[in-house]
Image: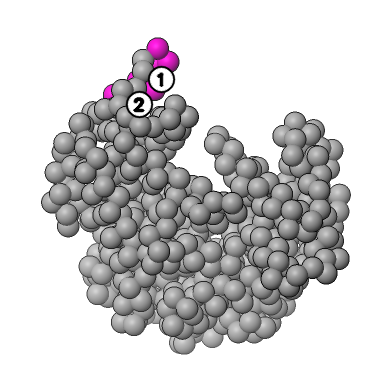
Amino acid sequence: MNKSPTKVIFLWHMHQPSYKHPHKDYYILPWVRLHAVKDYYGMAKLLEKFDKVKIAFNFSGILLEQLVDYAANSAKDYYSILSLKNPAYLKRQEKDFIIERFFSVNFERFIKPNRRYLALYNKKLSPKLKFSSSDIGDLQVLFNMSWFHPYTFDEDKNLRRLKLKQENYTQSDKQYVINKQYEVIRQIIPLYASLLREKRIELTLTPYHHPIMPLIYDTDILENFPYLKKPLSRFTAPLDCAWHLEAAKDIFKETFGTVPCGSWPSEGGVSEDVISLYADEGFKWIGADEAILFKSLTTEYVSYDTIKNQRHLIYRPYRFKGVDIFFRDRNFSDMLSFIYQGWDDSAFAASDLLEHFKRTHCHIRDIFKQRAITIIMDGENAWEYYKNNGVDFLEAVYSALEKSQIFSTVTPAEFLKHTPSKNLERIKPGSWINGDFGVWIGSKQNNFYWHILRKMKDLIEKNKGDSKISAEIKDYFHLLQGSDWYWWNTFTDTSKEFKRIFFTYVEKIYQLLGKKVPAYLKSKEQRAESKV
């Protein structure tokens, strides 16, 4: 019987798109600032408590750039600007914006338990009731305080006092809250750098603007998915894929003084061509979803269903074209992402996860000498749905793993030092969602976006203008390749901000090219009616 411990790999992925408006000196949306305060800081701070636990963290290049901007330049966003304004001097439009947007937190975890926040929420639902200046002031503070990590409240008695106060907040109260946010943000990069030096973590990255690389490489990859409708115009830009990897490495090196060896490709999107690019750029390993492995091992003689029922296959690394690949356990990753958040007993949820780990250990310990359970998931958006922002749950999981005799945590790079990878003859394309790319292409609206990219690419290639302007145009074009613009065509974006940001940059590129913006790009109605 193999008594060596089963390794557990956690990779927490963090990313946000660029929220900077091309004509403004501030960010349009606040999610980098707010997730920095609550999640990027909290996830690293939590790990400090467990000397024997090792974790991998993954950042997109554009997220690192924005974090540095907030930390070094005290960058502002529209929400932070409105947060600091005196309610008595707000314009009607600004008041309406605050009333509409400053409830953008998890209702069950943040609004419902807070008497004053809940009262304001109910007032919003009653059109006949008007918000007073005092109401607006309290809403400004309550929204921003919801985004502090629990550890920050533990560390700061003034924040605890403001939390207990609940209402009648002053301008100085608001200033303290916002100043505290920036104080926390300035600790984030040094905190991760310290953990990296101590070899407590591995830092990895995602291509710069978080593009779905196989689609940027060539949208004809959809020939592998005949049920997804291809865009009217083929888009292919392999050199842009290389740019996203190189630019991400550059900002990573500027930030941490080193170059990572691993990557979680954007949304786990892979193809054989993309993996070749990773090899060319010097990456040693990447992550992908288990469905990619199962599809890649399927043959005319062995069905997909037969392969996927052999779950032991995902607990070892594989190699393709010189790049090692870890395949995430979708069941465990999704349990942490979507299931345990609804369990109010955090200790019981953690215990349940460990019991699942133990059953897996018993199943695979005699199959592979070295084996790893790989969990790769969003490291920022899940925790607001958990009780106490997931602190109790994660502390219980980390503590149990630290004390365990049959498990130990390890980073991907460390695991590869002692474990040979099995060669794969092929890799089937796909992402972590359904094993395909249907979230980002195939619908009428998303295919319209890809059509726009193709038209702009043709114009850019013909452009012979000023080199400085040409570089700016290419930067904006790369920004439009980010996955989030397409994601929010598939899922509900009630604010419509992602659509507005996308078309703002489209129009900016046309202006820099000296071209008239086509009418169909200006008209919302025409865009909706597009037959592309």
| Residue hosting label 1 | 125
Give the vertical position of 133 relative to 150 (above or below). Answer: above
Please say whether residue 15 is one of the residues in the magenta stretch: no
Q: Which residues are magenta?
A: 119-128
Magenta span main SS:
helix
Q: Position of residue 270 (x, y in %)?
A: 66, 66
Tally the numbered discs: 2
Give the vertical position of 10 relative to 166 (above or below). Answer: below
Real-space CA distance between mark 2 and mark 1, rounded to the nearest whole angstrom: 7 Å
Give the vertical position of 164 relative to 4 (above or below). Answer: above
Q: Is residue 410 visible?
A: yes
Q: Which mark is residue 121?
A: 2
Helix, strand or loop for disc 1:
loop
Quadrant where the N terminus sits is bottom left
Q: Is residue 258 left or right of residue 489?
A: left
Q: Residue at x 62, y 43 (%)?
A: 500
Question: Which amino acid is tagged 2?
Answer: Tyr
Q: Position of residue 22 (x, y in %)?
A: 60, 54
Q: In this view of the protein, which residue sits in the foreground, 109 or 244?
A: 244
Q: Which mark is residue 6?
A: none
Q: Is residue 295 left or right of residue 520?
A: left
